[in-house]
Amino acid sequence: MQMPDATPEKCRHCSLFYDQANFCAKLTGRELVDLNAASQSGMIRRGEMIWDEVLERWPIFAIESGVISLQHLLKDGRKTIAAFFMRGDVIDMRNTSNRKLGHLIALSDVGVCRLSERIFDRIIDENLDARRLIWDNLRDQTFRAIDHSSDLAKKKAQEKLASFIFECSHRAPQAHKREDLVDIPIRRRDLAEYLGMQPETVSRCFKTLEERRIIKVTDLSIIKILDLPALRRIANGARSEPGGVALCPQTGYTIATSRP
Amino acid sequence: MQMPDATPEKCRHCSLFYDQANFCAKLTGRELVDLNAASQSGMIRRGEMIWDEVLERWPIFAIESGVISLQHLLKDGRKTIAAFFMRGDVIDMRNTSNRKLGHLIALSDVGVCRLSERIFDRIIDENLDARRLIWDNLRDQTFRAIDHSSDLAKKKAQEKLASFIFECSHRAPQAHKREDLVDIPIRRRDLAEYLGMQPETVSRCFKTLEERRIIKVTDLSIIKILDLPALRRIANGARSEPGGVALCPQTGYTIATSRP
DNA sequence: CGGCAAGTTGAGCCAGGTCAACTCCGGTGG
DNA sequence: CCACCGGAGTTGACCTGGCTCAACTTGCCG
């Protein structure tokens, strides 16, 4: 960016380049040119998966648009969406054991930029800003996954759905965002698989939330939050009493300070 | 290690130092001395939590022994163990949003080494091996969390338990490990919270697996695997038919190659 | 306008949550 | 040494949230 004229043609049309919070925006002109020369961008259509052979050749890639999912398939056909990745996520699939994790399947049409392993590593080595950003992104992925685990573990169907609405809201691109409108970027059935429930149950939960005047489902992909505090309470698992209950009802642990 | 004599006293008794797969083993003598001088090791007893103030001061630490958990508490008192960390894990809790994630609570007596943020960053910047290792560790944490999510999402109680046994087996320190003996480092109730089920259900599942001659529970913390293939099948969700069913029973997706 | 995939609604059922009683253990104090 | 206690784990009986299966509606695309 110190040399805007040198910006590769491809990158000039890529949203990753213009969003300051993304990897490409942190690169110097030279780095961008090098990375771009050795990388390739492409489009994956909804339902397509990234084959292992492709991953072998291009284990690192950035999502430019759309949603891609990491799916597990159980032997008897049950399917789970274990995580999904959106614009700005950089996915590093080196390390064979990780690749056994599941299949990368696009949940919508997805724009990806496959990065050259060699150049990527070189940039990570040399460019502190870029390294920090990648590191933060990976840590975000970690904590997001951990968060999701805890949603799945103990929450009821409605609570999971409420959490999911907030997750969508937080992860949506910052631009043109309205507080009360949330975009659901994936289909109901995928949503169900992500939350570990049945499409029927998802449908029923949306209905209940609408009946309780907490949300309004405008069209299938956009919901409007009518009562944010209520939705937040549900997401946080406040079961019946809206307020008044002690926040930390001593669940058996003797919580003491850890000696420093 | 180029200068073994310079090895700090503390480190000479620390298991992290001797295990080649751990961070400290990758450091040069000088780095180890510097890091050690600015760090402090300590012990956290079971049930104690790491307070936010301590985390503020020491956001990065390595686990030397024991098991520490990241717990969420729902408003109505339900509790979840979202993840747990064991020997060799390096936890980086910088970035405020992550800290809202939950509480770090020891599930057993835990030895930690709190690392100086400054020196840690310096080493990461300078030492390629160390950086790679930390990066891999973080990526492991990510994929482990994702894996765990998918366990929670679609698996039945027994299947989750089977998966958990394998998780314990994989994560156990490499040394003195026998193929068929698995150490369960946490209590039943914590296990239940990790797997999103009730202690009663955990107990019942262990019983069923014993009755089916798949495992043997020697004492509460050690189980012996009697029929590994069967256990693996259960963990992978092969519902009834042990074999013969098609592995990928086309569940609706048109799976096509992604254009490279 | 037909055809197909996605989503919704309804009815019935069961895995696992819930509650209560009981056992087993290690620590403590008389 | 034994009686007592409290916390962890187990067992049993019951009940319910959400899964299942099937029929229906809606929306999209050629």
Image: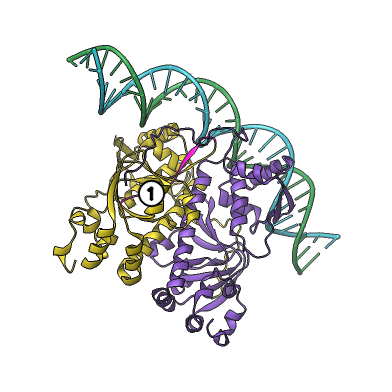
Chain colours: A purple, B yellow, C cyan, D green
Query: In this picture, which residue range is highlighted in magenta?
Result: B76-87
Q: Position of residue A39 (x, y in %)?
A: 50, 79
Q: Is A12 situated left or right of B61 in this image? A: right
Crowdedness near tag 1: few (<14), some (14–19) or many (≥20) residues, C-alpha within 10 Å: some
Say which residue label 1 marks. Answer: B54
Q: Position of residue D29 (x, y in %)?
A: 75, 66
Q: Position of residue D14 (x, y in %)?
A: 55, 22
Please name the residue shown 33% across and 50% down the image. Answer: B86
Instruction: Look at the image and tell me whether residue A114 can be seen.
Output: no
Badge count: 1
**Is A57 rendered above or below residue A157?**
below
**Is B47 rendered above or below residue A8?**
above
Nearest the eye: B253 or B119 = B119
Q: Secondary structure under badge 1? A: helix
The chain carrying label 1 is B
Nearest the eye: A103 or B92 = B92
Displayed quadrant of residue A113: bottom right
Q: Quadrant of the N terminus of chain B?
A: bottom left
**Is B76 rendered above or below residue D27?**
above
Nearest the eye: A5 or B250 = A5
The amino acid type, in three-letter code, at marker 1 is Val
Residue A135 highlighted magenta (yes or no): no
Q: Position of residue A186 (x, y in %)?
A: 63, 58
Instruction: Look at the image and tell me whether residue B197 can be seen.
Output: yes
Please name the residue shown 61% across and 32% down the image. Answer: A241
Q: Is B143 situated left or right of D17 in this image? A: left
Residue B79 highlighted magenta (yes or no): yes
